[in-house]
Image: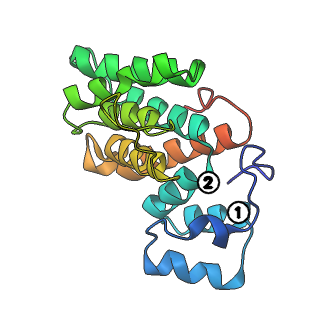
């Protein structure tokens, strides 16, 4: 399933990545054999532990790549009836990925709040905001985020995107999104996976 070289993921020991990710017990049990990152991700997908695979991959990817993945998944949920605030949230998240500056990161907070954290687009935007060095909403205070806070937002975006729509399509969406994430981890842009 996964490509043998996930060049964007520097850690080869799956157990190191999995710590603190909130994996379910069956997924955690697979770590006893100390698999590599690639082997572990392959196992999770083969066993259809898709939510666990999403959690693991979101924590494994660097901030920009993970946020890009969240944006791709959120974009998949858009229709011609999607509210402008969702489109704007994704566009702002993507703008930060393209150019990760403070000027591009800061507006993502307002975009996430506008959609009230109820959509994949909102979580993709907040993934960008939480990828910075300061998550304080006011300039006078500096609040550094937890190192993996962005991953929680990415998980929210991917899972909301996968579970939106018809129930019989959830597993197919998870698989598509995981393939996109793996492609990104392998140095691709995730767009070629359809």
Which dot marks residue 60? 2
Q: Earlier in the sequence, mark 2 or mark 1?
A: 1
Which residue is label 1 attached to?
37
Cα gap from disc 2 to disc 1, whole angstroms:
9 Å
- The secondary structure type at the circle numbered 1 is helix
Pick the residue in front: 81 or 187: 187
* In this rendering, position of residue 176 left or right of residue 17: left
Q: Position of residue 134 (x, y in %)?
A: 45, 37
Q: Quadrant of the N terminus?
A: bottom right
Depicted 189 relative to depicted 27: above or below? above
Q: Quadrant of the C terminus?
A: top right
Mark 2 touches mark 1? (CB < 8 Å): yes
Depicted 187 relative to depicted 148: above or below? above
Residue appearing at x 38%, y 41% in the figure: 157
Residue appearing at x 41%, y 51% in the figure: 152
Q: Position of residue 90 (x, y in %)?
A: 39, 23
Pick the residue in front: 45 or 30: 30
């Amino acid at each position: 399933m996964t490509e043998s070289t996930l060049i964007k993921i520097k850690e080869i020991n799956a157990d190191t990545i999995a710590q603190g990710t909130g994996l379910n017990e069956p997924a955690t049990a697979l770590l006893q054999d100390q698999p590599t990152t690639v082997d572990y991700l392959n196992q999770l997908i083969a066993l259809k532990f898709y939510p666990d695979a999403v959690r693991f991959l979101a924590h494994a990817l660097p901030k920009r790549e993970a946020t890009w993945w969240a944006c791709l998944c959120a974009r998949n949920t858009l229709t011609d009836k999607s509210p402008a605030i969702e489109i704007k949230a994704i566009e702002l998240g993507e703008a930060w990925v393209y150019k990760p500056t403070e000027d591009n990161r800061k507006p993502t907070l307002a975009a996430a709040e506008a959609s009230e954290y109820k959509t994949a687009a909102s979580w993709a935007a907040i993934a960008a905001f939480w990828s910075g060095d300061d998550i304080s909403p006011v300039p006078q205070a500096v609040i550094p985020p937890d190192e993996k806070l962005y991953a929680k937002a990415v998980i929210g975006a991917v899972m909301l995107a996968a579970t939106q729509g018809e129930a019989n399509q959830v597993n197919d969406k998870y698989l598509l999104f995981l393939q996109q994430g793996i492609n990104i981890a392998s140095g691709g842009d995730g767009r070629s996976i359809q």
